[in-house]
């Protein structure tokens, strides 16, 4: 094992990217044991787009064994930040983590930043002692594990420099290390304490947590201390701040002390004193309320003073939480309000006074609600809450906002007033408005909303009627290098715009890093759940800005994710897809994403000029512009977010790309399929099968496959660095061949199945005998006759009839007249009688599927000549099969010669089955989440839309599966005492002279269930 002395800390360059990738791939156990695989190119891209100011790497004999980033802290001002720290598992225990952290502290000191922050997780007990020894304090917070390091601030104090020039701060630290949050509690303040000792010399420092600043300094010859009476101090009231200086030497100290005032703090005083032993002084301070309450994420307002002792400046500060006499919130349990509706609001009052008081609240007149009573009186005990129900009538759906004056009367009779702001939205059907609360800006249209967090410009797009999480958009970033500056800025301007078709919330953010650029963002909310995000960058300077990038990070749930990859759409049906790193973002082939989960859908798209891909653990959409000229702007967008705007990825894709986009098919994250997806082969031909993951983690397990009585077992290991496993199988007999088995890896086990159509060596026979066309593939026979009816009237399997018909004479039956049974396509607007009267021509055909397989059969051509709207439209019905395979493929072409345009017409398919002499013994099985899955004919039933249906009979072992097209208007099963019918409908639109093809329907016959592989048939199409 290498020793501590062999470790070198170097800064990142692209030549180390391969080593970083190797380190991450071998360090997954440090991060929960995930299977993410990182490549050299991914490291280069990630670091090129990183917000790191510096990246330190630990190297041992050319191998990268440690990683430590250093960036500007995005949550608060005045701090740098370690976003990521890692040590290779094989090199832990060599104090590499310590070296990396100390390097980050050293660089923070060098850059004159006062503080260094990081986050970890509460269970990371191994690392917490390391962080504390390196100067970090663990902040006691409910929702996060945040650590702060003030060593840089301490070392910048002139008075202390002689000590630290002689003594190493790390080795002389006397701090007690405990694996728990830090802090000394006093009057609701929390102090963090450093102590260093070296011989007779020592230094003690106390940092006040919320002010992120020093409030006490003690050395062997002096003590300086500041105190506030409490952490939360009442606004507009005078409070005393105490200062104490102790002189431990025999030489008098001349001390100058001056208070520092700010927009919120009035603490103005100056005094010069000579101190022999000890001095105490108290000075007044008055506070004003900030526009919003201090956030635990940010430095609070500070009360501060500057001491000058023997020429050395010593600043002292303490954070403070300005408070009013009380807090008032208007709240509603209801989320959807209607105009004129009576209801109840809740006025929540919280006293922040110690003594008992009586409050009188005058509710403001407004255009949004009518108060049942406008004057509210409540008695308050000190520091308690009271909730008062208020009866109201809603006058209009809008944002209620206004100031109210609260009169507070003490038991002594003394009274005073304070103001509070009410803010509450009343969204309702069709209502469009915007408004703000203390923390957020809002825009509404109906139940859909955009919420913008003021402190960091995090945006959520959601619906009040949704049970799912809203779509989050994180702080936008300008680059390169990308800056997190907007995460600490409040928008300088917010506008609400009521456009004709939408409601818009527009924000403006001024950049300091890329001054004088301004980023304007418009969130355009439509009433159907679509939100469009437009960005524009304005250059307000007199010089051009070159090579500017804008990145908009966002997050989308990964469960039920559909993502276009190469020539297909990867759809995740697995319960687990935990990380965006599992997605191959370089394979994203189109500009959209779609998720479907628990009956709700969310979708995202981006414009052609943008690029979508990973942004660390999030997804990011990036724009770039070569130049922004002076006093001009460039526009980008829109990014589109859809909330239940589309029910399927196909619908969202059509919305984004247009109806002209070529059809692509869905692929699950794990697949077992034959070479090139072609699942048609020939007897005696070797077929290469591939088990594949479309995710980035390497396969690491055993594949077991069963087929035709044989078993194949193959195994791969993570070290093989593969995402595919290949096996070869030769099929010796024709028909449907099912290959099934399982894949087992560490922590996972899954069942898999695929189907292969194996055609025989013979030919399909096509005969025309006295206007009866017969197609025979040696197991399946179907027939059509132009003198009977425009349909495939008969289908037999091994000599036994499957269809129901009344050849040779079509006539009335049940609801139809004439009725020909069998299988038939027809226009929904053309009656059976009209179609029956038209002339039908039957011809033999051969058609190729998309894989080049030749299918044989017949084509029935019918030209409409006697119909008001469909004259000169030609319907071609194709019925195709393969040698010795029990499959019938049927689809239609529409040759539109009517000299008019048709829009969203419906082409129906009807197939009538009777696989037994007695219709009552015939049944239909449909996939359903209900209890009943099998329905017998003889009773009138209409069964719901499903992707396939299985027809059978008590008298036969084999079953008939009808597989519908994946894109259809509807499908159903209808049965009564006379018929058992399977139907479907597909929309079609065409201008005159165009040829339209609808997707095929497949009828598959056999004893084995085909439903698990139905999608393979749905993906087939014909040229």
Image: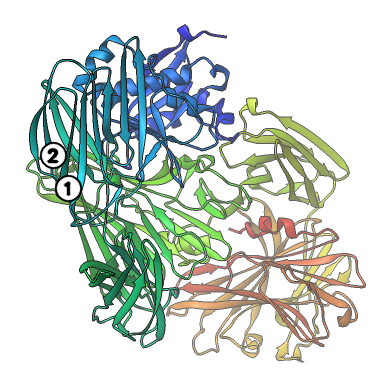
Contact check, label 2 and label 1, Cβ < 8 Å? yes
Counting residues from the start of the chain, the first of labels 2 and 1 encountered is 2
Colour scheme used in the picture?
rainbow
Q: Residue at x 41, y 54 (%)?
A: 472
Residue 822: image x %, image y %? Answer: 75, 77
Looking at the image, residue 426 sits to the left or right of residue 128; the answer is: left
Residue 263: image x %, image y %? Answer: 14, 49
Q: Residue furthest right?
A: 955
> What residue would you read off at disc 1?
285
Nearer-the-camera pick, 201 or 342: 201
SS class, disc 1: strand
Vertically, is 356 above or below 258? below
Query: Quadrant of the rendered structure where residue 225 is?
Result: top left
Query: Quadrant of the rendered structure where residue 955 is?
Result: bottom right
Nearer-the-camera pick, 737 or 70: 70
Q: Residue at x 40, y 23 (%)?
A: 134
Residue 1000: image x %, image y %? Answer: 64, 65
Whole-angstrom CA distance, mark 2 to mark 1, is 9 Å
Residue 739: image x %, image y %? Answer: 78, 46
Residue 777 visible in rendering: yes
Exactly how many numbered labels are in the figure? 2
> What residue would you read off at disc 2?
259
Nearer-the-camera pick, 1022 or 513: 513
């Amino acid at each position: 094992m290498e020793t501590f002395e062999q470790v070198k800390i170097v800064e990142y360059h692209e030549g180390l990217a391969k080593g970083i990738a190797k380190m991450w791939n071998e360090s997954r156990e440090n991060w929960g044991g995930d299977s993410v695989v990182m490549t050299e190119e991914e490291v280069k891209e990630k670091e090129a787009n990183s917000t790191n100011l510096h990246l330190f790497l630990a190297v041992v004999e050319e191998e990268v064994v440690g990683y430590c980033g250093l960036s500007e802290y995005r949550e608060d001002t005045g701090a740098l930040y370690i976003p990521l720290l890692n040590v290779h598992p094989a090199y832990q225990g060599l104090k590499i983590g310590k070296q990396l952290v100390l390097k980050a502290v050293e660089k923070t000191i060098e850059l004159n930043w006062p503080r260094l922050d990081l986050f970890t997780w509460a269970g990371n007990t191994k690392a917490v002692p390391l962080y504390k020894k390196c100067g970090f304090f663990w902040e006691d917070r409910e929702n996060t594990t945040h650590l702060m390091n003030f060593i840089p601030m301490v070392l910048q104090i002139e008075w202390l420099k002689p000590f630290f020039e002689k003594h190493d701060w790390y080795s002389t630290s006397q701090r007690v290390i405990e694996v728990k949050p830090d802090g000394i509690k006093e009057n609701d303040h929390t102090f963090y304490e450093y102590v260093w000792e070296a011989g007779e010399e020592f230094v003690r420092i106390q940092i006040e947590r919320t002010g992120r600043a020093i409030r006490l300094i003690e050395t062997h010859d002096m003590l300086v201390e500041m105190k506030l009476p409490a952490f939360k101090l009442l606004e507009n009231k005078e409070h005393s701040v105490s200062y104490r200086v102790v002189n431990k030497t025999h030489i008098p100290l001349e001390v100058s002390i001056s208070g520092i005032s700010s927009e919120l703090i009035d603490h103005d005083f100056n005094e010069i004193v000579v101190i022999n032993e000890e001095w105490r002084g108290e000075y007044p301070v008055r506070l004003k309320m900030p526009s919003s309450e201090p956030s635990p994420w940010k430095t609070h307002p500070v009360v501060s003073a500057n001491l000058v002792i023997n020429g050395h400046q010593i600043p002292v500060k303490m954070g403070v939480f300005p408070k009013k006499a009380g807090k008032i919130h208007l709240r509603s349990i209801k989320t959807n309000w209607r105009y004129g509706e009576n209801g109840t609001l809740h006025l929540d009052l919280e006293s922040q006074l110690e003594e008992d008081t009586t409050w009188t609240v005058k509710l403001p007149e407004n255009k949004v609600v009518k108060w049942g009573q406008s004057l509210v009186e409540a008695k308050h005990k000190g520091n308690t809450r009271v909730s008062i129900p208020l009866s109201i009538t809603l006058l209009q759906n809008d944002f209620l906002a206004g100031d109210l004056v609260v009169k507070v009367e003490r038991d002594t009779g003394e009274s005073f007033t304070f103001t509070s702001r009410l803010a509450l939205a009343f969204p309702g059907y069709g209502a469009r408005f915007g408004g703000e609360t203390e923390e957020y800006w809002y825009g509404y249209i109906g139940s859909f909303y955009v919420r913008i967090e003021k402190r960091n410009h995090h945006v959520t797009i959601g619906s009040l009627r949704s049970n799912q999480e809203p779509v989050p958009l994180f702080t936008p970033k300008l680059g390169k290098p990308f800056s997190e500056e907007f995460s600490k800025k409040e928008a300088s301007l917010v506008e609400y715009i009521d456009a004709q078709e939408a409601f818009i919330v527009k924000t403006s953010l001024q950049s300091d890093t890329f001054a004088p650029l301004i980023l304007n963002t418009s969130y355009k909310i439509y009433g159907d759940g679509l939100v469009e995000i437009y960005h524009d960058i304005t250059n307000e300077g007199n010089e051009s800005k070159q090579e500017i990038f804008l990145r908009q990070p966002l997050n989308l749930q990964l469960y039920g994710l559909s993502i276009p990859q190469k020539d297909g759409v990867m759809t995740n049906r697995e319960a687990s897809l935990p990380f965006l790193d599992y997605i191959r973002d370089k394979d994203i082939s189109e500009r959209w994403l779609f998720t479907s989960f628990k009956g709700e859908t969310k979708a995202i798209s981006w414009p052609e000029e943008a690029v979508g891909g990973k942004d660390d653990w999030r997804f990011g959409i990036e724009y770039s512009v070569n130049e922004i000229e002076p006093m001009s702007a460039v526009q980008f967008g829109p990014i589109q977010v859809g909330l239940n705007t589309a029910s399927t990825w196909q619908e969202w894709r059509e919305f984004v790309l247009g109806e002209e986009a070529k059809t692509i098919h869905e692929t699950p994250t794990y697949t077992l399929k034959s070479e090139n997806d072609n699942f048609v082969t020939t007897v005696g031909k070797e077929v290469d099968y591939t088990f594949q993951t479309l995710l980035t983690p390497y396969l690491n397990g055993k594949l077991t496959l069963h087929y035709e009585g044989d078993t194949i077992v193959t195994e791969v290991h993570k070290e093989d660095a593969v995402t595919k496993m290949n096996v070869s199988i030769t099929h010796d007999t024709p028909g449907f061949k099912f290959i099934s088995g399982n894949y087992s890896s560490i922590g996972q086990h899954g069942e898999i199945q695929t189907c292969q159509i194996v055609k025989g060596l013979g030919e399909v026979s096509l005969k025309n005998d006295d206007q009866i066309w017969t197609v025979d593939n040696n197991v399946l026979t179907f027939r059509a006759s132009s003198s009977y009816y425009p349909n495939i009237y008969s289908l037999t399997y091994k000599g036994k009839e499957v269809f129901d018909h009344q050849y040779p004479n079509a006539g009335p039956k049940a609801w139809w007249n004439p009725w020909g049974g069998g299988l038939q396509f027809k226009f929904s607007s053309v009656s059976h009688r009209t179609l029956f009267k038209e002339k039908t021509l039957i011809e033999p055909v051969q058609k190729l599927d998309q894989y080049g397989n030749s299918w044989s059969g017949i084509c029935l051509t019918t030209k409409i000549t006697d119909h008001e709207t469909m004259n000169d439209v030609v319907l071609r019905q194709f019925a195709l099969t393969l040698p010795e395979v029990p499959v019938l493929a049927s689809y239609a072409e529409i040759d539109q010669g009517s000299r008019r345009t048709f829009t969203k017409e419906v082409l129906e398919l009807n197939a009538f089955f009777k696989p037994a002499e007695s219709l009552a013994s015939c049944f239909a099985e449909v996939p359903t989440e209900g209890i009943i899955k099998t329905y017998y004919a003889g009773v009138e039933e209409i069964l719901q839309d499903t992707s396939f249906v299985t027809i059978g009979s008590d008298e036969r072992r084999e079953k008939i599966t009808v597989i519908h097209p994946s894109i259809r208007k509807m499908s159903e099963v209808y049965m009564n005492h006379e018929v058992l019918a399977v139907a479907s409908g597909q929309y079609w639109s065409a201008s005159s002279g165009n040829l339209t093809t609808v997707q095929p329907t497949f009828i598959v016959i056999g004893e084995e269930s085909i439903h698990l592989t139905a999608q393979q048939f749905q993906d087939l199409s014909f040229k």
